[in-house]
Image: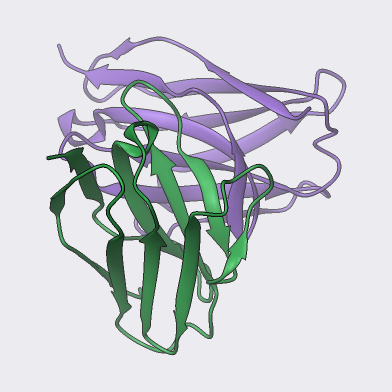
Amino acid sequence: DIQMTQSPASLSASLGETVTIECRASEDIYSNLAWYQQKPGNSPQLLIYDANSLADGVPSRFSGSGSGTQYSLKINSLQSEDVASYFCQQYNNYPPTFGAGTKLELK
Amino acid sequence: EVQLQESGPGLVKPSQSLSLTCSVTGYSITSNYWGWIRKFPGNKMEWMGYISYSGSTSYNPSLKSRISITRDTSKNQFFLQLNSVTTEDTATYYCARLGGYFDYWGQGVMVTVSS
């Protein structure tokens, strides 16, 4: 299975700040990577697919980038509603595998 | 709008079978792929398997001997059965539509395995 190493595990940031979360795959996943946001008590919501494509209805302050084994999710101008957990998922190989998640809190 | 809703018992005894239903509205399960994912306490997530538009299935090798995913197209539902559960199967179980990534998810159902 492809291992997804996500960092940091937790993050504290101020409103308006730019935040970056990273995922590293154990082998090349050819941009077959998604990012999700999960708020407490809610189901995960797709943010980004194909490493850099914004899902429908997702604010443009979210963006994804990367290639090969290294990928990142950037949140520009952090808003209070962005407090959540974020995790990555590769779908280049079966079984699909997930990062361990990043918990984002307000400073 | 595509909506998914899981249902099933929240408590299962060790060695018994876990059975969950995913009811889909707004989209036919005879299109696309439909899967089960679980999130363990501690937040690790695991893809369990899927059933395709044609009824074919694929399972995570870690579960292959214990898992079965079936469907009822007349009710637009698909099902998860996990046999011989242990306390390590305690998790929140989600159903989702997949096309590689998961674009629609159910709300999840928490299942505890305990005697």
Question: What is the quadrant of residue B69 in the picture?
Answer: top right
Q: Residue at x 77, y 46 (%)?
A: B55
Q: Residue at x 16, y 61 (%)?
A: A8
Q: Look at the image and give the colour of chain B.
A: purple
Q: Residue at x 38, y 63 (%)?
A: A74
- Residue B91 or A7: which is nearer the viewer? A7
What is the x, y in percent for residue B108?
45, 24
- Residue B11 or A55: which is nearer the viewer? A55
Q: Height in image: A32 above or below A9?
A: below
Q: Residue at x 34, y 19 (%)?
A: B110
Q: Height in image: A59 above or below A2?
A: above
What is the x, y in percent for residue A15?
26, 42
Q: Look at the image and give the colour of chain A.
A: green
User: Is residue A21 shown left or right of residue A10?
Assistant: right
- Residue A102 or A90: which is nearer the viewer? A102
Q: Can residue B31 be seen here?
A: yes
